[in-house]
């Protein structure tokens, strides 16, 4: 488990994708401290297992599902990546619960400065937007951020100077892909309510029946 508090920005040394899977090598320093083979490190929010260690970095295998769900397949040697080691049991919970399991990608539409902060607008699919709420948490490329606004096409976050300096988010440009992981609590609520992804936005086949989510019948059935 991770918290979305990035420890350092690393660099892709090599990325070998054959078909839809492969291997990635990352140049890093801070996240190597205390790390062993078999440990997990979040790379731009993707939970990867360390399979070998070098004095200046580590290597991890990449499976097909990771390539399908994330921006990794479009990454290249020299790209910057946000890195975080798995949270220790006695560590502080600085961000929010992050599993490192990417839901999908989004596209940066704009970066606009407002005094000391930068507003970042990200466009993504309806099924991902359905699990994003204003003032809730979102993980963008492994960074725990607070959602400032949501529309039917995109969402916005406001990035403070410290986050901008310690991560690679503000070094991206409009049109760049980012990895997204929505709040896991919302996924469980959605599952328990029997809603398919996207139905909250009227995208599902049974949206007329289920788009309202909690109903009086639901509350009565569970004794609420």
Image: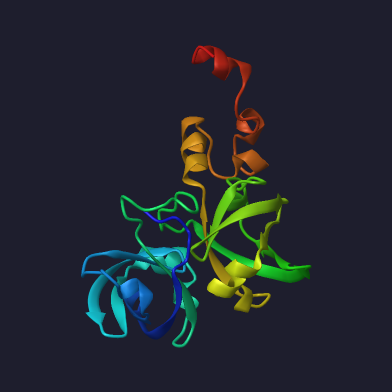
Total numbered labels placed on residues in the image: 0
> Which quadrant, please, contains the C terminus?
top right
The x, y position of residue 173, in whole percent, is: 66, 78
The residue shown at (62%, 53%) is 146
59 left or right of 164? Answer: left
The x, y position of residue 47, in whole percent, is: 37, 63
The residue shown at (46%, 84%) is 76
Vertical placement of 170 versus 46: above or below?
Answer: below
Q: Is residue 167 visible?
A: no
Q: To which quarter of the image does residue 124 belong?
A: bottom right
25 left or right of 133? Answer: left
The x, y position of residue 215, in whole percent, is: 62, 21
Residue sitting nearer the eye, 104 or 146: 146
Residue sitting nearer the eye, 104 or 184: 184
Q: Is residue 149 visible?
A: yes
Q: To which quarter of the image does residue 49 belong?
A: bottom left
The residue shown at (48%, 59%) is 4
Task: Please identify the residue farthest to the right as the structure is shown.
Answer: 115
């Amino acid at each position: 488990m991770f918290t979305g508090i990035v420890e350092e920005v690393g660099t892709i040394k090599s990325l070998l994708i054959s078909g839809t899977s492969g291997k990635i090598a990352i140049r890093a320093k801070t996240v190597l401290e205390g790390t062993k083979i078999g440990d997990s490190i979040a790379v731009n929010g993707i939970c990867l297992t360390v399979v070998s260690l070098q004095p200046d970095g580590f290597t991890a295998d990449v499976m097909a599902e990771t390539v399908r769900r994330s921006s990794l397949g479009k990454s290249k040697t020299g790209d910057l990546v946000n890195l975080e080691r798995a949270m220790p049991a006695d560590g502080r919970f600085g961000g929010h619960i992050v599993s490192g399991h990417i839901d999908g990608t989004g596209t940066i539409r704009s970066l606009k400065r407002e005094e000391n902060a930068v507003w970042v607008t990200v466009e993504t699919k309806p099924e991902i937007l359905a699990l994003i709420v204003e003032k809730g948490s979102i993980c963008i490329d492994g960074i725990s951020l607070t959602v400032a606004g949501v529309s039917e096409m995109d969402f916005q976050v406001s990035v403070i100077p410290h986050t901008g300096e310690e991560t690679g988010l503000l070094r991206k440009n409009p049109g760049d892909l980012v990895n997204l992981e929505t709040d896991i609590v919302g996924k469980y609520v959605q599952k328990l309510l029997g809603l398919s992804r996207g139905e909250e936005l009227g995208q599902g086949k049974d949206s007329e029946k289920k788009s309202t989510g909690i109903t009086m019948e639901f509350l009565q059935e569970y004794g609420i």
